Image (spheres, coloured by chain):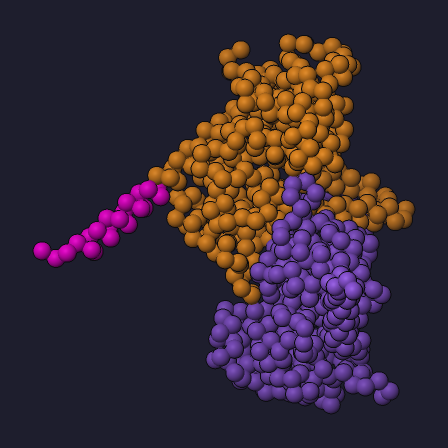
Chain colours: A purple, B orange
Amino acid sequence: MSTPEIRIAVDCMGGDFGLPVTVPAAHQFARQHPDTRFLLAGHAADIESALAKLGGPDRDWYEILPATEVVTMADSVEVALRRKKDSSMRVAVQAVKDGRADACISAGNTGAWMAISRYLLKTLDGIDRPAIATSIPNQKGGATTMLDLGANVDCSAEHLLQFAIMGSALASRVDRHKQPTIGLLNIGEEVIKGNEVVKQAAELLRNSGLNFYGNVEGDDICKGTVDVIVCDGFVGNVVLKSIEGVAKMVATMMRAEFKRDALSLTAGLLATPVLNRLRDRVDNRRYNGAALLGLRGIVIKSHGSADAYAYGYALARAREAVQNGLLDGTTSAIDRLRQSLLAAAAQSAKLTNQTSDPAP
Amino acid sequence: MSTPEIRIAVDCMGGDFGLPVTVPAAHQFARQHPDTRFLLAGHAADIESALAKLGGPDRDWYEILPATEVVTMADSVEVALRRKKDSSMRVAVQAVKDGRADACISAGNTGAWMAISRYLLKTLDGIDRPAIATSIPNQKGGATTMLDLGANVDCSAEHLLQFAIMGSALASRVDRHKQPTIGLLNIGEEVIKGNEVVKQAAELLRNSGLNFYGNVEGDDICKGTVDVIVCDGFVGNVVLKSIEGVAKMVATMMRAEFKRDALSLTAGLLATPVLNRLRDRVDNRRYNGAALLGLRGIVIKSHGSADAYAYGYALARAREAVQNGLLDGTTSAIDRLRQSLLAAAAQSAKLTNQTSDPAP
């Protein structure tokens, strides 16, 4: 094989469904991508039997990483970190830390997944806090990358700047946007323009060397005004779930209206291809695979309710992040920022020296 | 007439369209509601000619409040308050202050409208800051009242409690929910449960005597889990606009898909009644009319882009707020809270005395 192998460690036990989704999804992915190998973390016997059900695939594609424990949705971060030291989550992240895997993925408890990843892998130099980023389909036919989505509830302006760097690297390396445009989520001109942290963050972003577009508002997410939108984790989490809520409401109401009477049913049947195209355009399964950014390793989070189809998209995010050098992209973005800050500081020191030079 | 007259002061000049929307909407409303009279604030001659265009309606329905200035969307709060002292906005609010009108309404610059209302009317006893509330259609066929939507960017836990009181009064008096359920907007259990202010607010709400449901998440807005959702103005503004953005995106995509080819066009024609019903269910024109709560007077804000149909809904909100005693409802809710806090304090003092009583 000419391309180097990409090795993804999968927490097979996580998510609403666990093995019946994770193993078939990995299998399907391995068949489609001969450059990808999987390290399957979880109960060894159960993984073996899940593989056997798939008709005995090429066992060279898989290595099993035995783990005796499973982090549940109800487990606190404390329990996940301190008590379940042999969890499938931890074993998957450890494989990345040990250099045995290039990326890891879980559909389980987000808080635990973040805490374990952060504890084992640590953050990159220049990043104080990791962040969660995902893609939201937009009107332009693409997707808007948004972060943070809940890892950081209270953020400083510097944190928002770091999110912008990480989001920019993700958008350029994984979503192939050249010099991605960055928007800072803010409120309208109507009342008071944003809080103090957002105002300071805008100032930092203007001097960051990033392709900063300026402030954006809530409706810019779906408009696709910019490639990356930055906000604190409280706002990001609430907005993402609000958007999912509207989409669900519209889908539910549409189904109800098309079932109301015989005429509507007929119209619905005829409209099926149109409605399916519409559904495909906004199908959030195609945007599955949030990235936990800012860590010394590639860590992906699948939606807990993902089916094998959706899980495949999250695996593809992991593969693309490895293949396109997301980590290198992030560290060089941090370096560029550092250099431009140093240059600005040197320039400012020079100016200060010139002004403070006593007249001869 | 058996019912007392309701007098609404209208800033006729505000909004994207001004007179061509506000005057016909008021006229239509007066025809439908014989108990309602209008005080029309703005350029007197222009209002007269707008009325004349309507075929000379019953002039007793209207009184003109002449105003020589107009607050524009570009005007800062400073300009609106200090320089344009004879604006149609200000004249409309002044009519409420003077007791000549029971409510006032504008479709103009929200920040200016809030600032002028607050400056002239002042806040109710027990309310530190006014808030903006609106209704968002939900899956249950009703609407969820949400506040604050941008008047207060940085909020304390006490502010959130006050928003809950005001929102509860609005939902019970205007939307006729008995003991409205109150939800506090927060993020999922996944990571960290909300920031410190939200945690403290939950504590206050639990002891408030209000019908507090607990924390809700972004998707609960459209699910209709509770009657009223409370959040700070930054989050509320971003969420409201995000929701509007998704709705617009889905509508745009749907139109595009139904126009793609001849077959889709035919399906679209057949599906028209179904799609119209769907549109009506989520038509935000029917939910026009945000309330500026916590002021010593009823102040309504129409969407700037409202047409006469949508403006009529905002006028209806104003009328219902007057008719159902929104202000009384708010002040008695504040009083009830004060009494329950006093009772709790007395109880706690009694307990402290009992424990600290020296043994005889």
Q: How many marks?
A: 0
> Residue A22 or A339: which is nearer the viewer?
A339
* Dominant secondary structure, magenta: helix
Report if residue B198 lies within the magenta region.
no
> Relative to the observer, which residue lies in front, A198 or B296?
A198
Residue drawn where x is 49% and y is 79% of the image: A82
**Could you tell me which quadrant the C terminus of chain A lies in?**
bottom right
For residue B284, say whether it is visible: yes
Q: Position of residue B351 (x, y in %)?
A: 24, 52
Segment tinted magenta in the rendering = B340-360
**Residue B66, image x, y percentages:** 68, 16
Residue A355 as seen in the image, left or right of residue B287:
right
Above or below, B88 against B61 in this view is: below
Q: Is residue A146 above or below residue A17?
A: above
- What residue is rendered at 50% in x and 45% in y? B159
Q: Looking at this view, name the residue that lies furthest to the bottom.
A: A60
Residue nearest the observer in this picture, A238 or A278: A238
